[in-house]
């Protein structure tokens, strides 16, 4: 039992939001409803604009009364039906879980209140209103690749210790570098393809039912272990900073 408790205390879980917790990418859907999403995403993917410029275009199209808009918008959106059960399991077992997302604090907080979800720590970009919505990138890092304004890799490294076992759950482009420094990875869609192409061990999943089923086995059997290549990559990142 002592080893079981020790193993639990060492696990830290980091979870992407858009396309992972939410069924759709919420920022994509908001952009599609209010602006020229196809035009700007194409420019971003072609490297004609940076991720920061892309998000600035996104914030320009946000309705001034964002609360009223989000209230109506979320009526037609869904979260993974098993996400809350997974978070509750983590909480009941004193396993720290955090959201790390390239979305914005205002939108994430509104979603959390709308669905009355258990409160957990969120690392994200920020929105402020000053004669229109403006984006702030407090967690950016110039060495962290082009796909995410939030440097998810550094968020993970800066909020774990050398002894922690890092679990990452994600689906997209912005999750690539986070996966490289994580020990146990749950991946789908673009992230699963990236992991397969780069020979990064991972669990494929469709819903948090799959995640919870596998994760419970790690916890119950005290079988979570550090991944050697992830440890080396974390060390390399720290040395570069």
Image: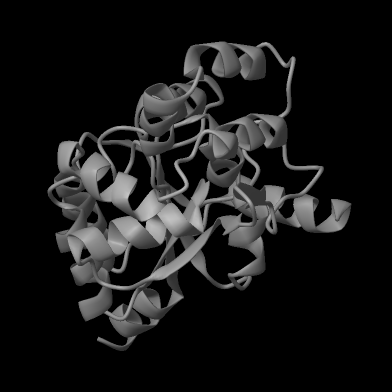
The residue at 27%/70% (across/down) is 90
Task: Name the one closer to the observer, 34 or 184.
Answer: 34
Task: Name the one closer to the observer, 20 or 43.
Answer: 43
Give the quadrant of the C terminus.
Answer: bottom right
Give the quadrant of the N terminus.
Answer: bottom left
Residue 195 visible in image = yes
Q: Is residue 201 above or below residue 222?
A: above
The residue at 64%/29% (across/down) is 54
Indicate left or right for 21 with 201 as reference: left
Q: Is residue 30 above or below residue 151?
A: above
Indicate left or right for 179 with 25 as reference: right
Can you tell which quarter of the image residue 120 is in?
Answer: bottom left
The residue at 25%/71% (across/down) is 118
Tag count: 0
Can you tell which quarter of the image residue 186 is in?
Answer: top left
Q: Residue furthest right?
A: 240
Q: Position of residue 24 (x, y in %)?
A: 29, 32
Residue 167 visible in image = no
Task: Name the one closer to the observer, 233 or 63.
Answer: 63
Q: Position of residue 103 (x, y in %)?
A: 49, 46
Q: Position of residue 30 (x, y in %)?
A: 39, 33
Colouring scheme applied when the structure was drawn: one colour
Task: Name the one closer to the observer, 110 or 164.
Answer: 110
Q: Is residue 236 above or below residue 43?
A: below
The residue at 59%/58% (across/down) is 128
Q: Position of residue 193 (x, y in %)?
A: 44, 21
Q: Residue furthest bottom?
A: 2
Indicate left or right for 141 with 19 as reference: right
């Amino acid at each position: 039992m002592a080893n079981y408790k020790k193993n639990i205390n060492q696990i830290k879980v980091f979870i992407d939001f858009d396309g992972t917790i939410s069924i759709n990418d919420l920022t994509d859907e908001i952009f599609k409803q209010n602006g020229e999403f196809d035009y700007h995403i194409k420019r971003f993917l072609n490297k004609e604009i940076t991720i920061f410029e892309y998000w600035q275009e996104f914030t320009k199209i946000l309705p001034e009364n964002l609360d009223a808009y989000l209230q109506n918008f979320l009526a037609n959106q869904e979260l993974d039906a098993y996400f809350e059960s997974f978070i509750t399991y983590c909480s009941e077992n004193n396993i720290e879980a955090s959201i790390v997302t390239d979305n914005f604090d205002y939108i994430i907080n509104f979603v959390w209140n709308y669905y009355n979800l258990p409160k957990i720590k969120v690392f994200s970009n920020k929105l402020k209103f000053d004669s229109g919505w403006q984006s702030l990138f407090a967690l950016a890092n110039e060495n962290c690749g082009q796909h995410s304004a939030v440097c998810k890799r550094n968020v993970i490294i800066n909020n774990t210790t050398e002894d922690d076992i890092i679990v990452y759950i994600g689906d997209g482009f912005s999750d690539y570098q986070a996966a490289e420094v994580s020990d146990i990875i749950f991946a789908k869609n673009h992230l699963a393809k990236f992991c397969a192409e780069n020979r990064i061990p991972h669990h494929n999943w469709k819903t948090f039912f799959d995640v919870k089923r596998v994760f419970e086995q790690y916890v119950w059997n005290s079988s979570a272990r550090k991944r050697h290549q992830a440890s080396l990559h974390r060390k390399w990142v720290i040395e570069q900073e």
